[in-house]
Each structure stands twice: as structure tokens, then as C-alpha cells.
Amino acid sequence: MSNAADLGHPGAVAVVLATSSAAIAMPVLTDAGGGELPSQFAGVAAWIVMADVLTIVSLPLVTAQSSVVRVLLASVAVTAIAWLALIALRQLSQSRYWKRVDAASLEKGWSLNLRISLLLLFGLAWIGPKLGTSMLVAGFAAGLAVSALGVSGRLTQQILGVGEGFLIPAFFVVLGATIDPKGLFTADGLILTGGLVVGTTLVHIVGGAAGGFRPASSLVASAQMGVPLALVTLGQSQGWLDGDQAAAFVVAALLTVGLCAIGTHRLGRALPKHFNPGLPSDLRLAEGDATA
């Protein structure tokens, strides 16, 4: 597929085919369970999270313009910095001084935890590319460090608000300005788009079957977004991905979200009625009657 579309980065294509998007699939699974993750979905949820994390870590290595060893060392360095920040924040969170400051922040609306989280995120996102690794690794490491402060529901909502209200829309505006939708109707664009969708489906169905998962679970796990978009950003900044190819990756990722919706619908049929308040009554079948 990489050779047919003239990409020259087969490792990058392999990472995209194998990835899953926890940000898309997990809320869908939780919603299908009526607001909580049913035990029937625990296995596929673990698969999705593991695939997401491993492909995020792998992406800088397979797209490296310089030595892979350098990229690996840069990732280790960013992780080490985040680990030191985690230790420092954990010590800080246990002090009486911090507890007083945290209480004052909550009372007066300082959003101190959010400010620290964003400072770590932007700091590591600046350091990561300077050292030679991806912002994805830096962002993941920042999240681990912030967890030392205790991620409350309030902080989670604040971070989601900043992301969904500003950072994510800004990213999509910049990304949309760099892709060429007309490229989808070229031979290379059609080959790449179709190959990515079909390849992703086959990889997840075969992999899921090997792990004992039903096809519906594999379709849920095939949802993609973060890694393909990161690959598009990296590929265009490094000069080995053009606007036509970028459009193919973006559209293919959007189509996998549709596959996830189909898989979730079929999995929802395997749950008891009380797990699926949002589904029509004729679709709320008992687990034993499911054919997903």
C-alpha cells in the first residue's frame, strides 16, 4: 500500500492500520452501557487503550528523519523529565501548604491545577520536538505527571473544556488548511483511502479473532483519529506527505469512526435491557439472543 501510494514510509502505514482511538471508542462503549463500562466490554476496552498507547509511542520511531536511536533517547528523556515532575508534584500534593493553596484555589476560582497541567503540557510539547521526539509522547508524559496531583472530575472537565473549546478546533483549522480534498479523486488518493479503510478493518478483525473477540468488538477497536492526524502533521512538516495523501489519511480515519458506530450498535445488542436505555426496545436483546 505504501509503495502503491508512493509514501515511502511503510512503518507509518503499519502503525495507522494497527492503532485505535480510546478518545472515540471509550465514550461510545460507556454510552452503550448506560453511562458505565459494562464488564462485557472490559476486554475490548483494554485492547483499545493498549493499541492507542503503543502506536502513539511508536509513531515518532517509524517517521524518524534522523537516527531511530536519537528519537528513542529523546522519548526517554521526555519521559524522565515527566517522571521527575511527577515525583515533585506528588511530594507537593502531600504537603499541608499545598492543601491550603488548593483549597483557596477551589474557593476563589484560581484553577491552579489546570494552570499547572497546561504549563507541563506546553513545556514538554516544546521540549519534545527540540530533542527529536513527537508532541504525542510529550502530551502523554505530561498526563502521567499531572496524575500525581490527583485528577478530579473538576480538573478533567476543565482540561476537556480547554481542549474541545480551543486546542482541538484550532488544530483542525490548521490541519484543514493544509490538505487537498481534490486529491481524494485521484488514483493514488482512492488507492490510499480504500486501502487504509479495508486494511484497518482486516487487521482488527484478524487480530481480534486471534484474541478471542467477536467481529463487532474489532469494528469498535478500529476507530482512529489521533494517530492518523498526528502522522499527517508530522508527514507534512517533514516533507514526505503531500496534501492529496494527507486528505486520504483524514478521510480514512473518519470512515473508521463509522465502522466503530456499526460495531457499537451490534455490541449493544449483547447487553441486557437496563444497560441500553438509549436503544429502541426491539434492539435491547438479552445477551444470549445476541448475534453480534
Image (spheres, rainbow, N blue to C red):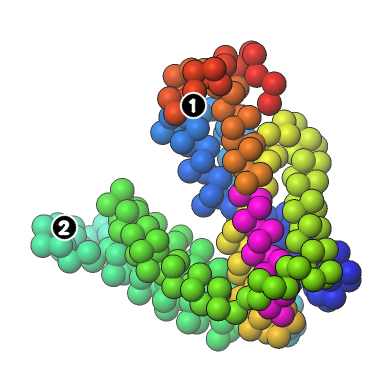
| Residue at point 61%, 29% (across, down) | 267
Q: Residue at x 42, y 78 (%)?
A: 123
Q: Label for residue 279?
A: 1
Eyeballing the image, is 10 above or below 263? below
Crowdedness near tag 1: few (<14), some (14–19) or many (≥20) residues, C-alpha within 10 Å: some
The image quadrant that residue 227 belongs to is bottom right
Nearer mark to the viewer, of 1 and 2: 1
Using the image as rendered, state which of residue 71 and residue 76 is in the foreground.
71
Examine the structure image and report whether residue 148 is included in the region drawn in magenta.
no
User: Which image quarter holds the N terminus?
Assistant: bottom right
Callout 2 crowding tier (Cα within 10 Å): few <14, some 14–19, many ≥20? some
Principal secondary structure, stretch drawn in magenta: helix
Residue furthest right in the image: 4
Which disc number belongs to residue 264? none
Q: Are marks 1 and 2 in contact (CB under 8 Å)?
A: no
* Displayed quadrant of residue 105: bottom left
Q: Position of residue 279 (x, y in %)?
A: 49, 26
Whether residue 271 is situated above or below residue 225 in the rendered picture: above
Residue at x 53% of width, y 37% of height: 29
Residue that badge 2 annotates: 106
Q: Nearer the viewer, residue 129 or 18?
A: 18
Label located before the other in sequence (1 or 2): 2
What segment carries the magenta color? 242-257
Q: Is residue 226 left or right of residue 144?
A: right
Residue 14 image point, x, y percent? 78, 61
Residue at image position (80%, 46%) is: 202
**CA–CA distance in space, label 1 to label 2:** 39 Å
Residue type highlighted by circle 2:
Leu
Q: Position of residue 189 (x, y in %)?
A: 77, 68
Under circle 2, the secondary element is helix
Quadrant where the C terminus lies? top right
Residues 158 and 115: in front is 158
